[in-house]
Amino acid sequence: MLGDDYVDGASSQWEGGRTLEDLVVRFPWAGVWSRPNLDRRTRSLITVGILAATNRNHELELHIRGALRNGCTVDELVEVALHCAVYSGVPSGIDTVRMIRRIRSDSSSTIRQGESE
């Protein structure tokens, strides 16, 4: 979802990071994200909501980009931000919409046909 370059280089720049990288790759990606009861698109929407609600902006940006690659539309992501605004605070919704808008602008050429622009 985030791409091999990200996963391969996320923590490998220092020896202690290799253990963390192994955990991050094995547990979520090989374990949780590969389970059959939710598709990747749905998992992406849930993840964006959780990260927005907990103010984890670095990971949120990565997962918004991943959600677009997993077939989520900009409109769906904005709905997640609106939902977060109600349940976790208006600032989280506003920040998430701003991030979606910036990412959409940065990568408008990579948004798939059928996704909102």
Image: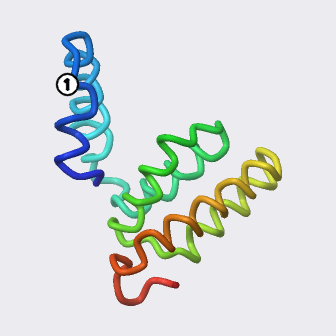
Up/down of 17 relative to 64, above or below:
above
The residue under the point 21% across, 30% down is: 26
Residue 13 x %, y %:
21, 23
Which quarter of the figure has residue 54?
top right
Residue farthest to the bottom, as pictured: 114
Residue at horizontal 29%, vertical 29%? 24
Colour mode of the rendering: rainbow
Residue 82 in the image: above or below residue 47: below
Q: Residues within 10 Å of mark 1 (few under 14, many from 20)?
A: some
80 sits to left or right of 88:
left
**Which residue is at 62% across, 47% downward?**
52
Horizontal placement of 99 versus 86: left or right?
left
Closer to the camera, 72 or 37? 72
Residue 117 image position (x, y, % from top left):
52, 84
Three-letter amino acid code of the residue under disc 1? Ser
Residue positioned most to the top = 16
Residue 40 in the figure: left or right of residue 6 = right
Q: Nearer the viewer, residue 55 or 106?
A: 106
Viewer-nearest residue: 10 or 85: 10
Under circle 1, the secondary element is: loop
Taking the spot 36% from the left edge, 89% from the top edge, the residue there is: 113
Q: Position of residue 11 (x, y in %)?
A: 26, 26
Considering only vertical position in the picture, is 40 above or below 105? Answer: above
Q: Quadrant of the N terminus?
A: bottom left
In the rendered image, which residue does mark 1 sit on?
A: 12
